[in-house]
Amino acid sequence: MRTVREVVAAGAGVALRPFGFEVRDRVLSEKPEGFPGYLAAAQRLGMDVNDYEESHLGWYPAPALLEATTFPCLQSDSIVCEVGPGTGRFSRWILPRIAGGQLHLVDHSPWIVRFLESYFREQPRVHVHLGDGQSLPFERQRWIDLVFVAGTVVALKLGTIQLYALEFARVCKPGGTLVFDYIDPTTAEGWAHLQTEGHRLPDVYTYHAPQVIDRVFADAGFEAFERRQFGKSTYFSARRAPR
Ligand SMILES: C[S@@+](CC[C@H](N)C(=O)[O-])C[C@H]1O[C@@H](n2cnc3c(N)ncnc32)[C@H](O)[C@@H]1O
């Protein structure tokens, strides 16, 4: 039996075809990126979707990245906020490192939020939140030990990055840590990426010079900047300045 949605889509498809429009089975407000397709492909192979993303899509292995950028800053009772977690590729490794802590996952995609609620349903220390794409859905200030963001700022415009920088500063405890990656076109890897993927997907990726990132995050209240290069990504880490 067809769902109401399928009937509406079929009817709209027939009505709009003479005008050159095609109705696809995709709800844009769900902001799912490619994840439903990755999930379906992983399920066909009997794999965890996060393993699939690394083994079949070539995404940089999460454990090595976390080991180098994030794990040294975690305590067992840390409160961590991850923004843009996708299907939890990093979250699943962060969680066991904070056995007495909390992991707050914030994403602007309702599809991702539903997926993560199901993926982590046995984990009471994981809290999944729908965000508005530029702020954090927490009223509380200065309560998070570490904010982690991977593969997300690489697509954000500077205005959005600046809004998030202020939010990260607002929720981080003094001395708390921020880790995220962006694409720096002054690095050899970032410049090469611009020539290939930047040209192929010009509406997806953004490129920011290090001086600009430094200024945005210093103005927001971060200090002690460090950078490490992993593939196209420059991983930036910073400490929330005490006020
Ligand atoms: C390319 S995926 C990366 C997923 C995951 N971090 C990883 O590396 O496997 C980008 C993620 O960020 C989310 N996202 C994109 N823009 C966002 C925004 N402005 N605010 C919050 N989440 C966002 C997407 O829904 C998706 O979950």
Image: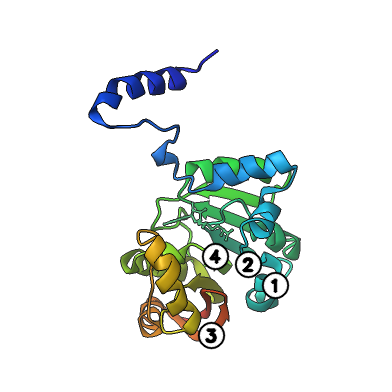
Q: Amino acid at mark 2?
A: Tyr
**Along the line of sight, the residue nearer the viewer: 76 or 108:** 108
Query: For the residue labelled by badge 2, is the local secondary structure a helix, a strand or a loop?
Result: loop
Query: Which residue is the site of mark 3?
Result: 226
Rendering coords of residue 187 (x, y %): 46, 84
User: Is the Cβ of the residue at disc 4 closer than 8 Å to that at disc 2?
Assistant: no
Pointer 2 residue? 60
Name the residue: 75% across, 42% down.
46
- Which image quarter is the N terminus in? top right
Ligand 1 contact, mark 2 (Cβ < 8 Å):
no
Residue placed farthest to the left in the image? Answer: 19
Q: Which residue is mark 4?
A: 150
Whole-Å distance between the Cαs marked 2 and 3? 20 Å
Of callouts 1 and 4, which one flags the residue occurring earlier in the amino acid sequence?
Answer: 1
Of badges 2 and 3, nearer the viewer stands 2
As drawn, is 14 to the left or to the right of 182? Answer: left
